[in-house]
Image: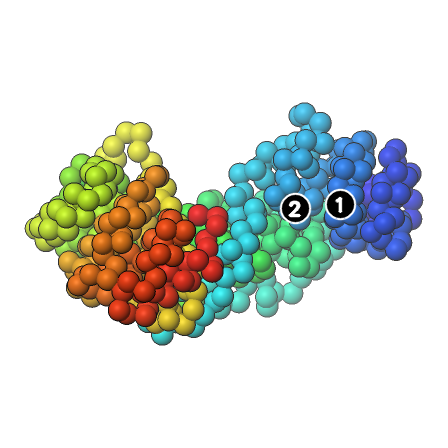
């Protein structure tokens, strides 16, 4: 009988030693657990008290299903120790396969800075965090009666079997049943249950396409601690293919506009605006990364709300091509303004995508959340699908901000002298504030000396906040 199945008998090799290992964390033996969730929680408790002994015992379990379920639960509960946990799984075993799959799930790995970030009400336009909030629509299974016995089928209480069944139901388009299976598989409040729901949303959209994105976002609302990560993932996963920006075509733009309309209907306006902003940010970044030159074809075609994203994407491309930040900041704004203002008609048919180019280059995620009410009063936008930036109403100033952000997101930025020159100058406030925030993001020790240089206290505060709330995971 499996450790994860209900019943009084636990006569498996290694079970006695496992109960001993768990004794310091549990007041009762595993045999007293009424269900699989109880056993998983006790194994997790034992791991907290004595990780090495727990791993040795789990690694010695003869039942491969039991071992895989325990290893999977431990990885979900302690993702930052996944390497050590997965090493107990014998090569080629089901547990080892599960570990390989989980290694591809970066959202499971703890990000204490973002996890503890405040979620402040915004006064100004734009997202308050790089992670969009989950939808306020009900989950697909919220109002659907469930026959637990029928859903369990032959799986009984085996969580890995139930989780696999959930993914099969998601692939079949049965989101309510898939979500319910996740709830039956794992205990409430556990990361493993949240990840099961996350994977249901992912499988639904991967199988059925962007037409089921709104339903996928509703599934994400049931993903607990992973709901924001799930929402971000689904918005980006369902994005229509982007054309090269310098050869933008009408069918591709129409597909994006239709997708935006679906996102707008997926939540109340206050929430869906963040979905839409993230989508335009990533889509324009992908389009510009495929371009050979900068021109105004895409800028002339997108709605005004997407224009800052075109500027940011073109600024990133310009910084990649012109690594000298001093020269780029001096000449780039005028050059990009001329190129983007040239206009141009959309092509009537898509052009082939350049070979070997499938994803836009990954940018650093800076200014990932509002740190106080002052920042929540500044207009913001997602930046390149990762992090955020300040937005200015003046297109030329907005280009300058975009270029400054682009150079700050280069692999090894060395721009503190340039930032220092902007702080306290006659440059627009938005540019000075961005320079102050970047200085604290990139070189906090040197940035501290810049406090008091600018007459606007909001600029000083951008530096102070970067020193007391550093984004240590960027």
Secondary structure, mark 1, is helix
- Which colour assignment does the render follow? rainbow
- Which residue is rendered at x = 48% and y = 67% of the image? 119
Q: At 27% across and 65% down in the image, what residue appears?
A: 454
Residues under numbered marks 1 and 2 in contact, where contact means CB atoms less than 8 Å apart? yes
Q: Could you tell me which quadrant the N terminus lies in?
A: top right
Residue under the image location 50 percent in, 62 percent down: 117
* Figure quadrant of residue 95: top right
Q: Which mark is residue 78?
A: 2
Q: Horizontal and vertical percent for residue 267? A: 43, 67
In the displayed orientation, state which residue is furthest to the bottom: 123
Estimate the x, y position of residue 226 in percent, counting from the top left: 55, 55
The span from disc 1 to disc 2 (Cα, nearest Å) is 9 Å
Q: Is residue 158 found left or right of 225 in the rendered image?
A: right
Q: Earlier in the sequence, mark 1 or mark 2?
A: 1
| Residue 357 located left or right of residue 153 | left
Looking at the rendered structure, which numbered label has been put on residue 71? none
- In-front residue for pair 409/463: 463
The count of marks equals 2
The 10 Å Cα crowd at callout 1, few under 14, some 14 to 19, many 20 or more, is many
Give the SS element for disc 2. Answer: loop
Decide which of 197, 331 is in the foreground and name it: 331
Locate residue 186, reporting x and y percent.
Answer: 69, 53
Residue drawn where x is 34% and y is 39% of the image: 412
Q: Residues within 10 Å of mark 2 (few under 14, many from 20)?
A: some
Q: Quadrant of residue 289?
A: top left
Q: Please indicate, yes or no, whether residue 307 appears anywhere in the rendered image.
A: no
Q: Is residue 451 above or below residue 203?
A: below
Residue at label 1? 47
Q: Picture coordinates of residue 130 (x, y %)?
A: 41, 57
């Amino acid at each position: 009988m499996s450790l994860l199945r209900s019943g009084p008998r636990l006569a498996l090799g290694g079970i006695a030693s496992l109960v001993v290992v768990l004794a310091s964390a549990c007041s009762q033996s595993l045999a007293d657990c009424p269900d699989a969730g109880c056993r998983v929680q006790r194994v997790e408790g034992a791991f907290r008290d004595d990780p090495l002994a727990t791993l040795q015992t789990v690694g010695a379990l003869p039942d491969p299903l039991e071992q895989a379920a325990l290893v999977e639960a431990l990885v979900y509960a302690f993702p930052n120790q996944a390497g050590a946990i997965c090493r107990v799984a014998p090569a080629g075993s089901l547990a080892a396969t599960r570990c390989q799959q989980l290694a591809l799930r970066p959202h499971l790995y703890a990000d204490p800075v973002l996890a503890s970030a405040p979620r402040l009400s915004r006064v100004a336009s734009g997202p308050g965090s790089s992670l969009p909030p989950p939808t306020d629509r009900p989950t697909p299974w919220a109002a659907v009666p469930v026959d637990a016995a029928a859903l369990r089928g032959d799986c009984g209480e085996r969580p890995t079997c139930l989780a696999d069944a959930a993914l099969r139901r998601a692939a079949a388009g049965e989101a309510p049943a898939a979500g319910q299976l996740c709830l039956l598989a794992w205990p409430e409040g556990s990361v493993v249950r949240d990840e099961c729901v996350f994977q249901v949303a992912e499988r639904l959209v991967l199988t059925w396409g962007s037409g089921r994105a709104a339903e996928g976002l509703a599934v994400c609302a049931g993903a607990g601690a992973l709901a924001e990560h799930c929402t971000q993932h689904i918005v980006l996963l369902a994005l229509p293919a982007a054309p090269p920006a310098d050869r933008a075509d009408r069918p591709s733009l129409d597909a994006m506009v239709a997708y935006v309309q679906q996102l707008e209907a997926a939540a109340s306006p206050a929430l869906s605006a963040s979905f839409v902003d993230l989508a335009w940010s990533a889509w324009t970044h992908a389009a510009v990364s495929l371009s050979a030159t900068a021109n105004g074809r895409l800028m002339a075609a997108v709605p005004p709300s997407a224009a800052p994203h075109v500027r940011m994407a073109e600024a990133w491309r310009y910084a990649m091509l012109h690594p000298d930040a001093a020269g780029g900041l001096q000449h780039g704004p005028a050059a990009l303004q001329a190129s983007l203002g040239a206009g141009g008609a959309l092509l009537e048919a898509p052009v082939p995508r350049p070979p070997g180019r499938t994803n836009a280059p990954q940018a650093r995620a800076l200014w990932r959340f509002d740190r106080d009410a002052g920042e929540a009063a500044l207009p913001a936008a997602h930046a390149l699908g990762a992090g955020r930036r300040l937005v200015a109403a003046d297109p030329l100033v907005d280009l300058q901000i975009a270029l400054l952000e682009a150079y700050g997101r280069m692999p090894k930025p060395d721009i503190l002298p340039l930032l220092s020159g902007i702080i306290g100058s006659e440059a627009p406030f938005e540019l000075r504030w961005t320079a102050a925030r970047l200085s604290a993001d990139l070189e906090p020790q040197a940035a501290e000396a810049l406090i008091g240089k600018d007459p606007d206290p909001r600029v000083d505060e951008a530096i102070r906040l970067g020193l007391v709330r550093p984004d240590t995971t960027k």
